[in-house]
Image (cartoon, rainbow, N blue to C red):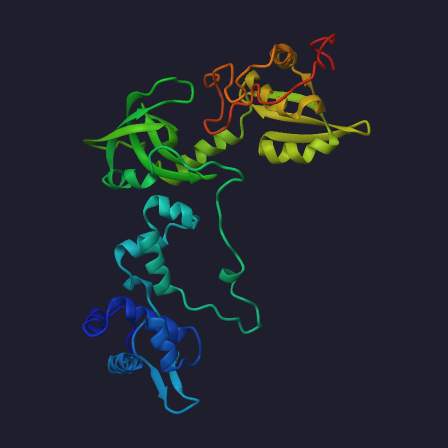
Amino acid sequence: MPYLTDPVVISGILGAVTPDRFFLLLLALQSRQTTTTAELAARTGVSVRTVLRDVRWLQEAGFPLLVRRGRLGGVTLLPGGLLDTSRLTPDERDHLALYGLDDTQREQLGASADTRRAHRKVRPAPRPSAGGALPLSTVVATDNRPWYVRDAEGLPPAALVGDLRRGVRLRLRYRGSEESEPSWRVVDPYGLLAKAGRWYLVADSAGRPRLHALERLVDWEPMRAARRLRPGATLSGVAAELTARWENPDSFRIHAELDLDQVGRARRVLGRRLAVGEAVGIRRASVTLNGRSVEDVRLFLQFGDSVTVTGPAEAREHIRRLAARILQRYSREEPTDRSASPHPPRAAREGADPQEPDISTSSFLTSSYRGRDAGHP
């Protein structure tokens, strides 16, 4: 009995049946116990006569097909005629290995067409299991975009894939999060990382791993020299190291008290950076923000008078200064042109998430820090 691993069998069949129709035909036969020729014709996009001819060729090639005529008849693929994905094209196998991407990300990567074709070849039609349960693929959908995220800007990831697959060094014209203008630099790339609706180039710069947001990548040039990666370093390993380092900063902890009705919102906005402690009285809870510097106290501004920073002293002093500036700004005469801001955006600050909006003055904070000692609540 032949399997789809015998090149002689494959070449003989594909000499009479197109590759797509060959795989679609087998998948249709696998999707149910018995399939009529009319159903096979609809699935493969050919006539019933062509289906009968294809089935005959498969039988002659040794595939275990049982054909019954009549009103209750049809074509049955007996046990032993399993599809072997090694018969997929190299590009199709490669795209099937890209797990975790949704349809939008595959489109951005330029991989949607090959992925759809590969899925048609290896995924049988959905049918209930023996216990009556629906297939998992019919009850799960994937969308990796965060809520309210804007459309991706900058270079599409598909533009970089060709040079990344060549395994060469890249010369980037890139603007760092703390820089006002882009500059050229040479990197040794590992590859691309798709995370939270954004694309990043993972690369070593001067021997140190870094994430480069494609939104700030202005231009690039492939170099002739092969990339020089650190021994034992891989794309998945370096990406995991960098994301863990960013998501788990321990350099500056800011303590505060937050109204209980704002705790849920704070968890959604701040994610793992926020740790919620014990209740304080009947209206508040103690919280701790794991930040990168004192500047991250700005993240509490969006909660207005629902939050009181309790320490450390420099964080209280900084948010007091910010509150005074905000109060002063809103005490001024209203600008005549409400469509334009009277002040330009702040420059990117040290330690800021390269994808986060600057919320330094986007929210109102009352002067709840006036008249209190900076070191005590």
| Residue occupying the point 65% across, 15% down | 312
| Residue occupying the point 40% across, 38% down | 237
Residue nearest the observer in this picture, 9 or 143: 143
Residue nearest the observer in this picture, 129 or 225: 129
Q: Is residue 77 visible?
A: no
Q: How many marks?
A: 0
Q: Quadrant of residue 92?
A: bottom left
The residue lying furthest to the front in this view is 336
Q: Quadrant of residue 122?
A: bottom left
Picture layout, residue 321 above or below residue 61: above
236 sits left or right of 60 in the view: right
| Residue occupying the point 37% across, 48% down | 106
Q: Quadrant of residue 273?
A: top right
Picture layout, residue 153 above or below residue 206: below
The residue lying furthest to the bottom in this view is 70
267 sits left or right of 119 in the view: right
The residue lying furthest to the right in this view is 282
Residue nearest the observer in this picture, 183 or 153: 153
Q: Position of residue 15 (x, y in %)?
A: 18, 72
231 sits left or right of 363 in the view: left
Q: Is residue 217 visible?
A: yes
Q: Position of residue 336 (x, y in %)?
A: 55, 15
Q: Position of residue 194 (x, y in %)?
A: 41, 40
Q: Quadrant of the C terminus?
A: top right
Q: Quadrant of the N terminus?
A: bottom left
Picture layout, residue 238 above or below residue 369: below
Q: Position of residue 155 (x, y in %)?
A: 33, 34
